[in-house]
Image (cartoon, rainbow, N blue to C red):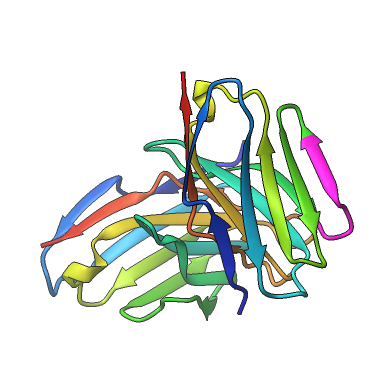
Amino acid sequence: GENVEQHPSTLSVQEGDSAVIKCTYSDSASNYFPWYKQELGKRPQLIIDIRSNVGEKKDQRIAVTLNKTAKHFSLHITETQPEDSAVYFCAASNGNNRLAFGKGNQVVVIP
Amino acid sequence: DVKVTQSSRYLVKRTGEKVFLECVQDMDHENMFWYRQDPGLGLRLIYFSYDVKMKEKGDIPEGYSVSREKKERFSLILESASTNQTSMYLCASSLSEPSYEQYFGPGTRLTVT
């Protein structure tokens, strides 16, 4: 099955700086790559996703890039704010309605 | 607005008890999922269901079973709870293609003593 790995496990950034989280996946048939954000004590929620026919997608301060050749995709958060502090999960799907999640990255934005 | 609810936020059970966790979604989603969330291990899929009475094992099905008698309801059953099943349990639902977005419930923190 699909194996998704995230790096680094914890990321601390100064408020206003950028944060980048990278994920790698193993199944070359995967074609859907979402990112979920989970704030402390709350449920995971989708923040952005990308399909394999697109190389980059942006939504305000967040963007996701996909490199199919290298089988990795990254979440970019610009101008970080305290409310960006959360655990971020990447995931991948090969079209079987299932998502294989990574183990999560803790992002801490230091005011 | 999609709503996924779970029957309990916190649950304490004794070793050997049979435990039922209930999940209900109100958006007519075909797919429903049960995950277990443990620190450092992310979200691990226990079981999922793509239709009423249909189920598939996820990555860690041992010690669990599920039931989906109605489209909106998906139950996770711990036949004989053990201390290593102490965890946060998250339910989710989604449509089938082209959208794979999963909507999560608030979670049930289960403690087995």
B63 lies left or right of A4 = left
A85 lies left or right of A2 = left
In the image, which residues are magenta? A51-58
Q: Residue at x 65, y 23 (%)?
A: A79
Percent coordinates x, y for residue B22 in the rendering:
37, 58
- Which residue is more in the foreground, B59 or A24? A24
Percent coordinates x, y for residue A44 in the rendering:
51, 45
Q: Residue A70 colored magenta?
A: no
Percent coordinates x, y for residue B18 in the rendering:
21, 71
Asked if A13 appears above or below B92 in the picture, the reply is above
**Residue A67 visible from this viewpoint:** yes
Residue B71 lies in quadrant: bottom right
Q: Residue at x 63, y 57 (%)?
A: A23
Percent coordinates x, y for residue A84 in the rendering:
54, 29
- Which residue is more in the foreground, A26 or B61? A26
Among all residues in the image, which is located at the extreme right?
A: A53
Q: Residue at x 53, y 76 (%)?
A: B53
Q: Residue at x 71, y 28 (%)?
A: A61
**Residue B29 visible from this viewpoint:** no
B50 lies left or right of B97 = left
Residue A24 lies in quadrant: bottom right
User: How many marks can you see?
Assistant: 0
The quarter of the image holding the N terminus of chain A is bottom right
